[in-house]
Image (cartoon, rainbow, N blue to C red):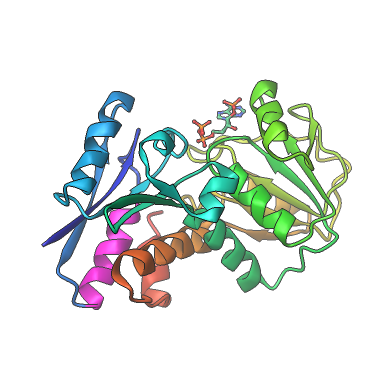
Amino acid sequence: MKKYFVIGNPINHSLSPKLHNHWLKQNNINAVYEKIKLEENEIENFLLKIKNQEINGCNVTVPFKKTVIPFLDKLSSEAKQTQSVNTISFHNNNLIGHNTDVAGFEKAMIKLNYEVQDKKILILGAGGVVPSIIYVLDKMKASKIIISNRTMKKAEDLKSQFDKISIVKWGEAPDFDIIINATSLGLNNESIDLDSSNIGQGKLFYDVIYNPNETNFLKLGKKLGNQIENGKLMFIYQALEAFKLWHNVEPNVNNKVLNLLDND
Ligand code: ATR
């Protein structure tokens, strides 16, 4: 039986096993998908197990999306450009790093039917998923991408990777069309301290978090009269792309799959 994992730290809350095991069963694939918490010094050994084919592939989540890169033989173009790997496969004796967060976010924006071209975007956060989001927004021709992160240094590191972005101080809210919460604030019912006095209507509030379904950030967007969207589709589509890479099968995204991730 083939074996797949999601590696991260912490990993307890990952819903990837639920989703992948559902699709494996639905498609009669003889494989299992589990989560495993690793320390940084255990990563190299874990990846060797993929090379030995004891394990067949893995997803990578916070905080290891960059850490795994030196241990891989090849990177997809998206993984190389974002310096972020969330899926690892083994092909022709090579460990290959892919970034399916890119396709996940892009498909989620397309499904939303939201025209990103010429829009001003404010991204809150500078963590693991932000390079993928910037990459997609740039590809979709956003006119301006502004980053606001509590730790300024991390925003500046992103700026050296993506010349096009600008940076504002944490807590500032310059004019935007789309605001994206890519911090972990909201996972445990936290609010984000945003000056909402000038935000107004006609904006899109997007939260990468999908559990809870509606964070305080999204509640604020709604209260101000704006469109809101959580990160559920992004999560599902990044998993779908990984599933396709490993199994050569396109799994279904239907109501059953959407409901599977409702843990509220
Ligand atoms: P990582 O930073 O390890 O990649 P992440 O979950 O991808 O982890 O990112 C966490 C994001 O949430 C970061 O942007 C983090 O800000 P810092 O870079 O300043 O750490 C942000 N974050 C987490 N807790 C926060 C808080 N209490 N206030 C503001 N931002 C917070």
Report if residue 227 lies within the magenta region: no
- Location of the C terminus (image quadrant): bottom left
Magenta stretch secondary structure, dominant: helix
Q: Quadrant of ligand 1?
A: top right
Is any atom of residue 222 visible in this view?
A: no
Q: Where is residue 259 in the image (x, y as percent from the top left)?
A: 39, 68
- Quadrant in which residue 150 is drawn: top right
Left or right of residue 257, residue 178 in this image: right
* Residue beneath the point at 40% across and 60% down: 262
Is any atom of residue 196 visible in this view?
A: yes
Q: Which residue lies furthest to the left in this view?
A: 1
The stretch in magenta equals 15-27
Q: Where is residue 121 in the image (x, y as percent from the top left)?
A: 78, 49
* Residue beneath the point at 61% across and 63% down: 106
Q: Where is residue 202 in the image (x, y as percent from the top left)?
A: 83, 61
Report if residue 20 lies within the magenta region: yes
> In front: 49, or 198?
49
The correct choice, above or below, for 230 with respect to 73 in the image is below
Q: Position of residue 147 (x, y in %)?
A: 73, 37
